[in-house]
Amino acid sequence: MSWFSSSDQPDSQPDPESELRSLELFTPTGADRAMALSVLRRFTEATADGRTEEAQAVLDAVEPEAPTGPTMPQVLGASVGLLDTWFSDRRYRSALSSVRAAARRRPVRACASDLLAAVRKGGGYASIDDLSIRHGGLAMFEAAATLVSASVAAIAKGQRTSVPLAGRELLIADTDYTGAKLAPQGRGIGYSGFTPADDRMVEAFGAWLSEQDDITGPDPDQEKELLQSILALTRVAGIDLHNPNDMEAVLGFVDDLDADDQTPAGATTAFLLTLDDYVHFQWERARSPEAWERADEAVEAELGASDEDADQVVDDAISATRQVDPAIRRTTLMGTLAVTAVRDILGWVGKSRPVTATGNLRLADIEPVAAMLGIRAEGVRSTTGLEEPYDDTMDMESPIPDPPVYYARTLREVPVLHAWWTAVCASEILETTARTVRPGPQAQAWLAEGGPSLETLEDFAGFVVALVLSLDTDSDAADVRGLATRIALRAAGRTLVAATDGLMMPEVPDEENWDVPILLQRLAWLRNLGLLETDPSGEFRALEGTRAAVADGALRVLQNTEPDWDEGLEEGWDEGLDD
């Protein structure tokens, strides 16, 4: 074999340079060791599962010399080092006593028998040169791998566990070695051990993504970059992303990343979604797709568990808002404009007031009632000549500013007033008849000296929040309804983050953020009603005492949205194109 020089012959004098070279050849470190262990683990699992052709193919794929590894000497050195370690460990002594030199090929079996005798005496590594010369380098390489496989199987039997589980514990890379690190978006991942096969696979994955109607990532290039990160990170841990039987190990590795405080927020979710696309890609192109089908089931199960974990995080965050002292919650809500205006409207209505046939405020009444909420508005029959010029210099990171005066032909054209009026009537504080509005069944509770109960206060405030966030989602026009629902969902997400601790909005591409000023405008409206405030950094946050009510309102929007809301948006666009 090419890794033996003439000075390795038994009669030769010791050559320090040759000994140093031999040590380098047979002692893989870092990524080389991780890849050598990956070969041994794949070989061991295939052998244990009776997949003899696959097991032999794993060994046949290893070259005597390779620029990126692993090489035959590296796998051989790692194998014999493991054998020496295991056979000298008292924990495994009983289990390993049953190991035998079994191999299909006679030269390999003979070499394995001699190597087994050497490692039982603790001299496996010292025997590499002699046994390689006596039996040949290839036989020595396969014999060492065969004994590793037999040893892992024996230890697994002794521990009453499976070979894959035992292999993942015994054939693992150095825990203090990091050959690749997560890096900021758009930068290199700090790993240079990709093979030509890796490059071909990643490029094929990118091409496949480009042909799909729907992918989990923002675009194929970003998913390719994520896949490269997964490939590098799992490889240095001794896991082979090319092998569908390693998917459970890949998912375990992702779980470990999730538990690491140094892992960027959202990285593990992005990895799982990329893996979901990846296994579908491999499944479609595999000659024998059964293994990739099992891998897909494993990823889908992990995504389901991830969703459940995410739901639990949200539930915990919302539950925490209800742990605030009830006295603080009550006092805070009683001081919000959304609540103080209730007494004002009851005083204004008196015994009754005339309203429109639809139960809304008449044009003449819009101005005084809007003023109760700090809104300047006038009811008009025509807005001709009153329109505000469109501001095309609007800051995309700031709320759309309200007009100095709302000139409204209907109550709907003063959005916050319409939402609040709807909440007051729906909460039975007021009730409307064919032509009048009068105090409703709940009016007395709101007029009582102590005011309504905390439950009533929070229910009303949450209702106001939900209505402000979900403007126009009841539109008869499909395109308006679809667009309004998208905005309502995104605004509700931001509002929920503002009301809780520990939740974050998912990142989306810049081109998807065209509606940010609209979302911020809705949060600004809630601030004007006293339900939110702006912290020193400029971010919207709920007050301590309004957190529960605000979170409840945002959750109502998120939970009550129809699953197929986006079909209305697509339907509306189609109708517009047809017209």
Image (cartoon, helix red, strand yellow):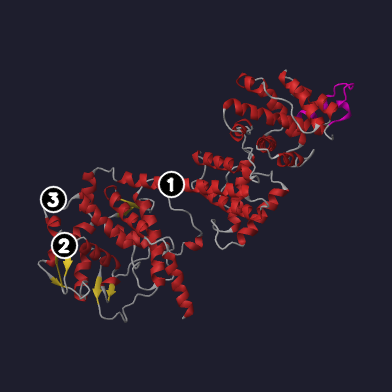
Under tag 3, what secondary structure?
A: loop
Q: Nearer the viewer, residue 101 or 445?
A: 101
Q: In the rendered image, which residue does mark 2 sit on?
A: 344
Q: How many marks?
A: 3
Look at the image and say whether residue 220 sits in the magenta stretch: no
Q: Amino acid at mark 2?
A: Asp
Look at the image and say whether residue 8 sits in the magenta stretch: yes
From the top left corner, tell me how far across and down residue 273 is, in percent. 53, 51
Q: Which mark is residue 308?
A: 1
Q: Amino acid at mark 3?
A: Gly
Q: In the rendered image, which residue does mark 3 sit on?
A: 450
Which callout, 1 or 3, points at the residue further toward the start of the chain? 1
From the top left corner, tell me how far across and down residue 97 is, in percent. 67, 20
Q: Is residue 94 above or below residue 205?
A: above
Q: Which residues are magenta?
A: 4-24
Q: Is residue 139 above or below residue 234?
A: above
